[in-house]
Amino acid sequence: FSEFSDILGDFFGFGDVFGAGSQQRRTRTQRGADLRYDLTISFEEAAFGVKTRIKIPGTEVCSACGGSGAKPGTHPTSCKGCGGRGAIRHQQGFFTLTRTCPTCSGAGKVLADPCKKCHGEGHVRVEKTLGVNIPAGVDSESRLRISGEGEAGSHGGPAGDLYVFLHVQEHPLFGREGNDLLCTVPINFAQAGLGAQIEVPTLDGNETLSIPEGTQSGHRFRIRGKGIPQINGHGRGDLYVTVKVVTPTHLTKEQRRLLEEFAALDNTGNHPTARKLSEKVKDLFS
Ligand SMILES: [Zn+2]
Ligand SMILES: [Zn+2]
C-alpha cells in the first residue's frame, strides 16, 4: 500500500500542474500527465479510514520490443535529418538558430520498422491496481495526491501524479459538520416531562443519554469525543443529539382519559413559552 504524499484541503494546483506540463512539451524529456480518479467511500470509511484498491490506467514497457519501439530483431537508427542530435542548427546572419528536428521530433533516432505491439511507443497501456490507504477523518472536500502514479513521462521524463477526489456517501442517521456528527432522536412527551435514560446511536454503537426532566423539543445534547477523528491528528469531534418530542397519535381509551385528567390539572405555569406568551398578551391589553 502506498501512502498519500499530500492531503490537500482545497485543490488549487490545476494551473501550476498543467502550466508546467505545457512548458516542457518542447523539450525532449516530458513529465507525464496528472491523472484524476474519483473514489466514492462510505460515511464510516471516511470516519475511520480504509485500505482499498483502485484500478487506474497505466503503462508498462512493451514486452515485444523491450521498450525500444523497434520491431523485434531491428534497432532504432540514428536520424539522418539531424545526425542523431535531435536538433538542427543553421546560421542566419549573426545568429545560430536551433530548432527541433522535424524528422525525429527531437528524439535523435528513427524507427525504420516500428514494433507492431506498441506501434513504436516502446510502452503499452495496462490497467494497474494500486493499493491506497485513506486516512481517518477525510471528507468530500478531501483531495489526495499520490506522487508518481500519474501517466508515465516520455523520453525519460518523470511520471505525473495521481489525484484522488473523494466522495463520501450520506449516512441514514448522521449528518456531519466538520468533525462533529449530528443526529435527531425522537422522545415521547412523558420522557421529555419526567426525564429519562435513552439509547442513542453513535458510530461506535449505542450510548445511554440522560434526558433531564422538562426537556423541550429541539434541545441539543453534546456527547464529547463521539464525532469524526481529526485527520492526521489526535482526538475526535463531538456528537450532537437533538431530541424531538413526538406527539402521540391513536390514543387508547385509557390514555385519552389520563390525558384529559392531565389537561384538567394543567396550567400555563408548567410551560415556559406559554407563560411568556400569556404575560405578553396581558401587557398588550393592560
Ligand atoms: Zn514494442
Ligand atoms: Zn532527427
Image (tube, rainbow, N blue to C red):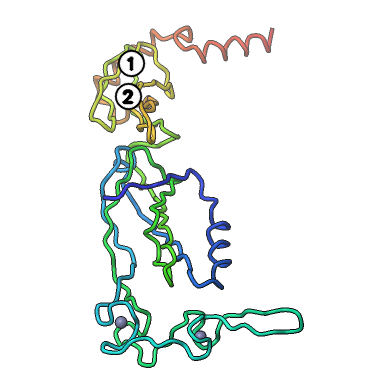
Q: Residue at x 43, y 21 (%)?
A: 219
In the image as oriented, which residue stretches furthest toward the front? 94
Q: Residues within 10 Å of mark 1 (few under 14, many from 20)?
A: some
Residue 28 or residue 40, whichever sits in front:
28
- At mark 2, the secondary structure is strand
Percent x, y of residue 190: 31, 17
Q: Amino acid at mark 2?
A: Ile
Q: Quadrant of residue 59?
A: bottom left
Q: Residues within 10 Å of mark 2 (few under 14, many from 20)?
A: some
Q: Amino acid at mark 1?
A: Ile
Q: Say whether residue 223 is left or right of residue 108.
A: left
Where does label 2 land, which residue? 187
Q: Is mark 2 within 8 Å of ligand 1?
A: no
Is residue 244 visible to the viewer in this orientation of the structure? Answer: no
Percent x, y of residue 201: 28, 30
Q: Say whether residue 85 is left or right of residue 71.
A: right
- At mark 1, the secondary structure is strand
Residue 116 or residue 245, whichever sits in front:
116
Q: Quadrant of the C terminus?
A: top right
Q: Residue at x 29, y 62 (%)?
A: 55
Percent x, y of residue 70: 33, 86
Is residue 210 visible to the viewer in this orientation of the structure? Answer: yes
The vertical placement of 116 against 133, above or below, is below
Q: For the residues labelled 2 and 1, say whether their Cβ atoms are less than 8 Å apart.
A: yes
Q: Residue at x 45, y 34 (%)?
A: 178
Q: Quadrant of residue 276?
A: top right
Residue 60 or residue 74, whichever sits in front:
74
Q: Say whether residue 114 is left or right of residue 28.
A: left
Percent x, y of residue 14: 54, 57
Where does label 1 land, which residue? 211
Q: Quadrant of residue 57?
A: bottom left
Q: Earlier in the sequence, mark 2 or mark 1?
A: 2
